[in-house]
Amino acid sequence: MTISLNPRRTVAQVEEGAELAPKFDESGLMPCVTSDAASGEVLMLGWMNAEALRLTLETGAAHYFSRARGALWRKGAQSGLTQHVVEARIDDDQDAIWLRVAVAGAGASCHVGYRSCFYRTIPTGPEAGAPLRFLERGKTFEPSEIYGDAPNPTSL
Amino acid sequence: MTISLNPRRTVAQVEEGAELAPKFDESGLMPCVTSDAASGEVLMLGWMNAEALRLTLETGAAHYFSRARGALWRKGAQSGLTQHVVEARIDDDQDAIWLRVAVAGAGASCHVGYRSCFYRTIPTGPEAGAPLRFLERGKTFEPSEIYGDAPNPTSL
């Protein structure tokens, strides 16, 4: 079956209905939270355009839109670290996606080489202002071995 | 201690450093994933400006910026469903936050009355195109009793 993205008619339809009626921002994108289906750890915050959403839902393999490269991208196409969608959810006003995934291969999802992109905690409360703390002891893979001299997607 | 948001000088500093050097978008906002610290369920995708991030880290209570209302907002200020930050994390390029929280009271975080804003699954793969499926059997609270006639933040 193919996905149809329905027009947004009423708040009740969007919040309480069973129709997929997503809202993309002025750049045509929506944020996507991706977590490990087994551990629950949040792996990354990605972006999807309508085509990335459609391909993700139809193929069951996570696709994103890279803002740095301005291009649609199947996660793991280069690294082999593909994300199989175990469950996809949409939020109340249908402007955000949550994917629960199983990651192939070494199980990493971060271009820096860590398992999760969220590999640092920010101290809070009485410790607010202290340095970030690294949670992962080492990298799961060495980015230069996977990506070669491709441009780093992090921009300043 | 107070939070200092450092200037972004190099990719290595941002990705591999221990300095908080967040990047907000052209609207001055960054996405924040908030999950239940105990169950791991993603509760909501919110937005923070620099002030919301600072208040969240310093007070340990989640603050967001409401795009619908154009205002800073302490989660639960009206409903009592406050979010205590158990852990805050930042991602590789420091343009997204992940909060693991403990929710007060009835434990709900969704303005529609559900526990999680992500209360519907989107069928994938062979089932792609089928109707959304509701995961929560009933609402945790009745929004009209909490919010009265305040405007619904969902926009079409």
Image: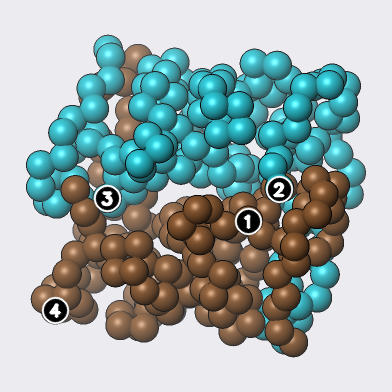
Chain colours: A cyan, B brown
Distance of mark 1 from mark 3, alpha carbons?
25 Å
Q: Which mark is residue B148?
A: 4
Under tag 4, what secondary structure? loop
Q: Earlier in the sequence, mark 1 or mark 4?
A: 1
> What residue sits 13% from the left and 45% below the top?
A13
Tell me the amino acid under the disc marked 2.
Leu
Tell me the amino acid under the disc marked 1.
Lys
Tell me the amino acid under the disc marked 3.
Asp
| Residue B59 visible somewhere in the drawing | yes
- Marks 1/2 in contact by CB < 8 Å: the verdict is yes
What quarter of the picture does the N terminus of chain A occupy?
A: top left
Answer few, some or many: residues within 10 Å of disc 1's Cα (few below 14, many 20 plus, some between 14 and 19): many
Chain letter for the residue marked with disc 2 in the picture = A
> What residue sits 56% from the left and 70% below the top?
B50
Q: Are marks 3 and 4 on the same chain?
A: no
Distance of mark 1 from mark 4, alpha carbons?
36 Å
* Vertical comparison of A45 with B139: above or below: above
The residue beneath circle 1 is B23
Distance of mark 4 from mark 2, alpha carbons?
43 Å
Locate residue B145, reporting x and y percent: 15, 78
Left/right of residue A14 with respect to residue B108 in the rendered view: left
Closer to the camera, B131 or B54?
B54
* Vertical comparison of A23 with B97: above or below: above
The residue beneath circle 3 is A93
Distance of mark 3 from mark 4, alpha carbons?
19 Å
Chain letter for the residue marked with disc 1 in the picture = B
Left/right of residue A77 with respect to residue A9 in the rendered view: right
